[in-house]
Amino acid sequence: MGGGGRPRRGDVVQGGPGVTSARRSPVAPEDSVAMRVVVALAVEVGIIALALQGAVTGAVAVTALVLAPAGYAFSYVRRARPSIVLKVLLALGLVVATMAFLQTVRSVTTVDAARIPLSGLFLWVQVLHAFDVPRRRDLAFSMTSSTTLVAAAGALALTTSFLWVLGVWAALAAAWLWLSAAPRPDPHAAPLAIRITAPGPRPRLAGVRSAAVAGIAALCLGSALFLVMPRLPASLLRTPPFSLGHRTPTPSSTDSVSNPGLPSAGGDGVVDFAALGYPGFSSAMDLRARGALSDQIVFRVRADQPELWRAEVFDTYDGSIWTASDTGASGLSLDADTQSYEPRYPSMEAPLPPPFSNEIVQTFYVSEAQPNVLFAAARAEKIY
């Protein structure tokens, strides 16, 4: 105890009959190997989640997966030997990562489009921070940061398969809560938590019980709100969540249909279409085409409500081949000078005004090479 009666760091305090409390210096290094392994695995799960959603390239993901555990191992070995040189090097690495991020977002025209570059920046911040986590509070920051990595990947996920990643991370988070609630013996300082000699609940079990109750309550409340709250219509978003800074040129300026999934006919005259190609998207549809579509997903569509889809219309049949007699009458022109394409329809096909029409938003997620025709709701007003 100090002269003024105020306890100092590392002092033992007599808190009452049968109760002895102590404070451990916050600058003391963390010696728990299990805690570091759990944090490293949680960060690895976040990196893998970003890679699976395409937020980072394969080379970046592999590099981060190798450097992150190496950083935690290096930090454990040097946990009691702080180095100013190391901090300077890590700061320089952070400056380089920030400059690369700023270079990437120069072509971004919307706020939401910066999510993927920002995820990459935070990934490198996490990797650099792994080399300097000597204390428990540093490990807590890394564990919290892994939450951000998983959340960023979840925002890009399109299927429920992401629940497996979320489940693995939740198990690691539970292990972190268990380990962080346990006192750690230290030969040079007093124990981390309160030591109770009188009869009563054990501190470790009490801390874990409180964390478990809080986590289950938050999960139940969040699930209930998710189930009862209606989903906001996508038509409320007036800014697309991406930019068109790098546009893919069309194969030609004509109205012809280009379908990369259809090979040319062989010598026997029978067309065998590819497993990922749809034979209806072409200037003519040959009913003699044979093949079997696979179960591989080529694109997904998300919409506010069900709607009749329209793509191509064939009106002439010669016994084996369907063709469109007048392709130019139903064609439309696109103005590509703005952020969105504004279709210009013929007068007979102009969109109907309200209340004869309603506004919906269809979002296409293309996974494989597709033709320049897609099934969609008729009379689109804007195409992003």
Image (tube, rainbow, N blue to C red):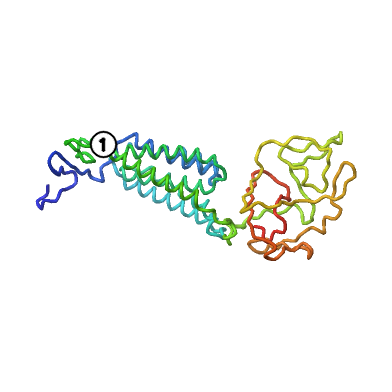
Q: Is residue 44 left or right of residue 12?
A: right
To which quarter of the image does residue 11 belong? top left
The x and y percentages for residue 328 are: 82, 58
Q: Nearer the viewer, residue 165 or 63?
A: 165
Q: Nearer the viewer, residue 108 or 228?
A: 228
Q: Is residue 16 visible?
A: yes
Q: Nearer the viewer, residue 82 or 296?
A: 296
Q: Is residue 308 left or right of residue 58?
A: right
Is 33 above or below relative to 244? above
Q: Nearer the viewer, residue 221 or 151?
A: 221
Q: Residue pushed farthest left?
A: 3
**Circle 1 sits on which residue?**
184
To which quarter of the image does residue 171 belong? top left
**Residue positioned 35% across, 45% down in the render:** 214
Q: Residue pushed farthest right?
A: 318
**Residue positioned 11% across, 49% down in the render:** 2
Numbered-mark total: 1
**Quick one: label 1, few (<14), some, or many (20+) residues within 10 Å?**
some
Q: Amino acid at mark 1?
A: Arg
